[in-house]
Image (spheres, helix red, strand yellow):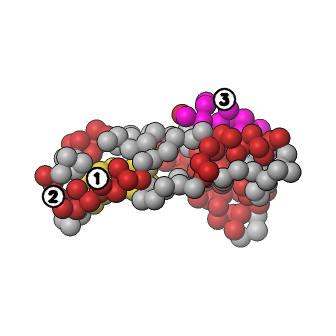
Amino acid sequence: MVNVPSSIWVDEDGVIVRPTELCAIARSEWADVQPPEDASDKIKEMWAMVRGLPRVDADRYVAAMRDWVAKGAASEFAMTPSEVVAASSTRRTETSAAAAHFDLGQHLHRTGFAADARVHFKEAHRLQPENWTYKRNAWELATPGAQGPSEFYESNWSDEVRAIGAENYYAPPAF
């Protein structure tokens, strides 16, 4: 499906000057891709939703990064440590537990224990329902190329994106 890259900016002294955020260094082709003529209505709907996802302005992102490289801390795009902390999300106990369940689920799936992995993927979904990475990976492992639905998960990509609106899938960088 859609792979959304993220970045973090770290200066030469190892200081974070921008927290993790979406990034793009080239224009995404996904907005232009059309499903095959013989695709099912479900697949056509999924492609329409993908085309409706927010786009990160690659030219603006690259220009901001170049400005920071050229000007360092004087760049309008570099944040102070307190600004980085303020812009960063807090990590709740549930978020940490969800990460642990997701990692364990991946390990179990890779080592041939798919049924055991699903228990941990479901728990990661429950603990951090807003985490699309956990959901997409679990759906893809259950139904490759389809992002759900499946006998293993109650939700799927299409239904969840339709519920929140493609435009709310993720927030672009704040600059």
Q: Residues within 10 Å of mark 1 (few under 14, many from 20)?
A: some
Q: State the mark number for residue 137.
A: none
Q: Position of residue 74 (x, y in %)?
A: 13, 52
Q: Earlier in the sequence, mark 2 or mark 1?
A: 1
| Mark identifier at residue 71 | 2
Q: Which residues are magenta?
A: 150-167
For badge 2, the amino acid type reads Lys
Query: How far apart are the two marked residues, 1 and 3, measured between alpha carbons?
Result: 33 Å
What's the residue type where badge 1 is placed?
Ala
Residue 1 position within the rendered picture, expressed as x and y whole percent measured from the top left: 66, 53
Within-10-Å neighbours for mark 3: few <14, some 14–19, many 20+? few
Of marks 1 and 3, the one in the foreground: 1
Q: Is residue 77 left or right of residue 19?
A: left
Horizontal and vertical percent for residue 107? Answer: 64, 65
- The numbered mark at residue 64 is 1
Q: How far separated are the C-alphas under marks 2 and 1?
A: 10 Å
Q: Residues within 10 Å of mark 2 (few under 14, many from 20)?
A: few
Quadrant of residue 102 within the rendered picture: bottom right
Q: Nearer the viewer, residue 94 or 173?
A: 173
Asked if labels 3 and 1 touch by Cβ distance under 8 angstroms, the answer is no
**Disc 3 designates what residue?**
163
Up-down: is 91 above or below 142? Answer: above
Q: Is residue 116 visible?
A: no
Measuring 77% from the left and 58% from the top, which residue is drawn there? 144
Q: Secondary structure at mark 1?
A: helix
**Relative to 130, does residue 152 appear above or below in the rendering?**
below
The residue at 57%/41% (across/down) is: 53
Say which quarter of the image contains residue 167: top right
Quick check: is 154 in the magenta stretch? yes
Q: CA distance from mark 2 to mark 3?
A: 43 Å
